Amino acid sequence: MSAVLSSLTRRNRLTIVAVAALALYALFFASSYDQRILTLAGIYVIMVLGYQFIFGHAGALSLAQGAFFGVGAYVTGILASQYGTGFLLTFPLSIAGASMLALIVAVPVLRLASHYFALATLALSQLLLLIAVNWVSVTGGANGLPGVPPITIGDWQATRGTSLLLFVWGIAVAAMLVARWQLNPLRVAVFTVMRDAPLAVPAFGIDPGLLRLRAFVLSAAFGGAAGALFVHTNRVVSPETLGFGIMITCLTMTVVGGRFGILGAVIGALLLTHLPEWFRGLDEYYLVAVGVLLLAMVVFAPDGLASFFKQRRIPASPPGHAATGIEENATSVKTGVRVLEISNLSKRYGGIQALDRVDLSINAGEIVGLIGPNGAGKTTLANIITGIARADSGSIGSAGFDLTTATPTAIARRGIARTFQTPQLPDGLTVHEAVATAAANIGNTANKASSISARATTAIATCGLTRIADARCGTLPHGLRRRVEIARALAGAPHILVLDEPAAGLAPPEQAEIAEILRTLAASGLAVLVIDHNIEFLRPLATRLACLDAGRLIADGPLDEVLADDTVQNAYFGLVQQ
Ligand code: ATP
């Protein structure tokens, strides 16, 4: 027993003590009124856990959680009170109803930018409220429907008091397990990248649309479950379950408790359901006291009270526990084989011809430098190759696949990785976590966690970053951030690497380190396209040089020949050396 206790972390020991104390209070000391408050807290825990998916992890201010709660409440309320349908059917139907609604509205709503998304979800809640109030024959209108029976399973009933409390908290624990399963540390890290560096997510083979959809539907499912339990507790379903009050309660609980993690949901729900009880004696000053307390919490714990406790992190694999696969795409392509073929590519932005009939090819094992004056179209070319922008005409092929109209996610999965002109790294993630996000395809993160972690470890080692694997990206100097981006690109086992100004802002020794990494990668068969202005960086590195000017490819060949070319001298050096 003592061995088991000593093997627990301090956090786990604290959690066990807190849960035991709460259980003792709930079962032996709480009055039936206190038990009712605790039951409501359990219901809100489920709703907040769901809301954390969309508001916390996906970072989208949804105001529809109250609507999903209401849909769950009405599905159960109507079926149970009007048709006598049992809990074992109404409960899953409530979850399914809310999830279906989320799926239906997701198509138009999820594409909207943040404030429009909030407004659209608010409009959904208002629409449902209108329906509930006006469709009297089905919903009972403003008065709602009384006579919702207690939860009944076979001969067993959870009428009120201890049985209902235990049942609701039992479902809350099941909801926690589902949330924990859905939010493994790797997926949490991917969500962090989606919030803090949105460009990077599709560039590493992860579909941000699907990620957001998953979060929205899960939030609805949890909301629907909470609503169903709520009407069994209140024994009546009324428009209040769809009202804005529920939404505000949910939002406040999430902000106060924490946008991430089970602990945040439990703290937020328990605290906000009990605050009114604790401050009841203050009479008319009650609201002021609650307001001041909430304000203080938001100021002193802006990430919620749960942020004082450590979060789960992706465990780093020890160095040397290398994954196979970092270079698996690269080595599967023979050096010299053409891996990227760009033909006749054009792109216009309004009156600007950013790319004009560009032809360029890259072979495995080659390092092609791409130069050109500012505005020549270099980043546009990188964006089109990696699917972030779409060409007006022309084609891009790689290893037999036409990637001209492919999505960034599909292109990344075909082994084309990139880095960005401004590194797209979330400050809060460690180097290991940031790199691991690219080693995973979100669809199968759960069972491959250890190999993903090992793959990240190898990519980090390849870029000479092992000693800072546990450092937060936000604490790193610019040069190291650029190397972390390269490690992240490698973690997806690409066969083509596109780098947008990897040497910009770096001191010569740092540039030399990056050049050395790229040479090693190219020697293993990786095709590298390096966009840079810095000829001193490219000279010893590039096996070929291409030059863009006003969207046109004006030269492509051996480095010395291109640099000596008159057109290049005019277009590039003429401008740069003024
Ligand atoms: P730099 O070296 O300064 O980064 P670049 O060679 O990478 O320049 P691009 O960023 O590709 O050049 O831009 C090419 C031209 O296309 C520029 O005139 C730029 O203003 C324009 N452009 C690029 N992206 C867009 C956009 N999204 N909307 C409108 N114009 C754009």
Image (cartoon, helix red, strand yellow):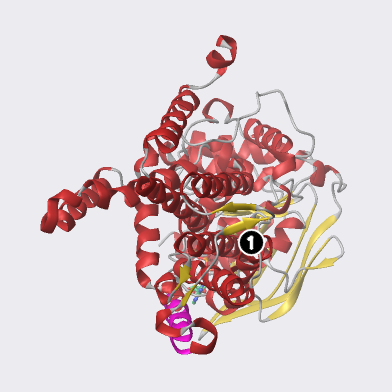
- Residue 196: percent from left, percent from top: 47, 54
Quarter placement of the N terminus: top right
* Dominant secondary structure (helix, strand or loop) of the stretch shown in magenta: helix
What number of labels is visible?
Answer: 1
Is residue 386 visible to the viewer in this orientation of the structure? Answer: no
Is residue 452 visible to the viewer in this orientation of the structure? Answer: yes
Which residue lies most toward the front here? Answer: 155
Please give left or right for residue 21 compared with residue 323 in the image: left
Please give left or right for residue 526 compared with residue 229 in the image: right
Please give left or right for residue 566 compared with residue 281 in the image: right
- Residue 128: percent from left, percent from top: 48, 80
Quadrant in which residue 239 is drawn: bottom left
Q: Which residue is mark 1?
A: 87
Residue 48 among those drawn in magenta: no
- Residue 113: percent from left, percent from top: 46, 72
Residue nearer the viewer, 574 or 409: 409
Residue interval drawn in magenta: 122-134
Q: Residue at x 39, y 66 (%)?
A: 247
Q: Residue at x 85, y 46 (%)?
A: 335
Q: Secondary structure at mark 1?
A: helix
Q: Amino acid at mark 1?
A: Phe
Q: Residues within 10 Å of mark 1 (few under 14, many from 20)?
A: many
- 12 relative to 241, above or below: above
